[in-house]
Image: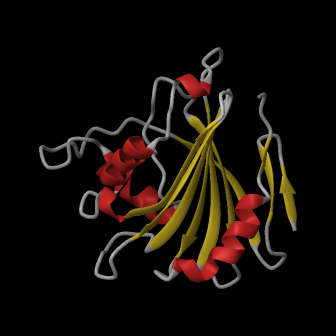
Amino acid sequence: MHDADNDFSLDYPSTWGVSNSTYTTYMCTSSVTPQFPNSSRCYQNEIKTIGPFDFNSYGTMKNAVHLITFTSPDGKEKVVAFISYFLDNLPGTSAIDPNLDWIGSEVSSDYPDIGRSQVGDFHYTPTGSRIYSSYTLKTPVTSAEYPLAYSLNYYVTYRHFYRFAFISDDPTIHEYNDLRTYIISSIKLNDIS
């Protein structure tokens, strides 16, 4: 199947379901402690129900986020598109650089008990008007964190911060590499270059 809207398009298996929604980011400070100096623990519910994204509100982006979820029939695998919009007249590539240090920080923030040591398969390609990076994270089987495994692709463009997560309830995410490659490689972004 093929799904297209004003932000992007991608191909996905015909048996999968699709849902669209909007999420409004917010600044959460209620759980800031010396042990967790950032506010990521505020967003545990969102991470469990939506995916491994940064739900915090930032001054460089609009608060409304476009969410599209593609789910397998058994619900064990899904692809979630989490699309943020940069403020008008702010080129996105000058606001975010998803390099390995930045990604390590994000993972440590979302999963403080796991940390950046579980980040693997990292790729980074800055091309001037677009920046692309990706990585895979597999949590230890003993971890209480969700999801057990995911692969996250970032695309930073002039107007958008695109995040696509391939999420699996199975820690052997590598068994789904062909499916993940089929879906992720079909992504076409709709933004100015």
**Residue 18 makes an appearance in the image:** no
Which color scheme is applied?
Answer: secondary structure
| Residue at x-position 45% and y-position 29% | 58
Image-based side of 81 in relation to 106, left or right: right
Residue 162 located left or right of residue 32: right
Can you see residue 118?
yes
Which quarter of the rendering shows the C terminus? top right
- Say which of 190 and 98 sits in front: 98
Residue at left offset 50%, top offset 31%: 96
* Residue at the image position 23 percent from the left and 46 percent from the top: 31
Q: Position of residue 5 (x, y in %)?
A: 83, 46
Question: Which quarter of the rendered picture does the N terminus lie within?
Answer: bottom right
**Seen in the image, is 28 located left or right of residue 178?**
left
Question: In x, y percent, where is residue 74?
Answer: 65, 85
Residue 52, percent across and down?
A: 47, 58
27 and 90: which one is in front?
A: 90
Q: Residue 64's image quarter?
A: top right
Q: Position of residue 131 (x, y in %)?
A: 61, 37
Position of residue 58 relative to residue 53, above or below, is: above
Please determine whether, in this image, residue 157 is positioned above or below residue 178.
above
Task: Identify the residue at the far left of this view.
Answer: 34
Depicted 137 relative to depicted 23: above or below: below
**Which quadrant would residue 137 be assigned to in this image?**
bottom left
Residue at screen point 60% across, 22% down: 87
User: In the rendered image of this protein, does residue 100 appear above or below residue 51?
Assistant: above
Residue pushed farthest top? 89
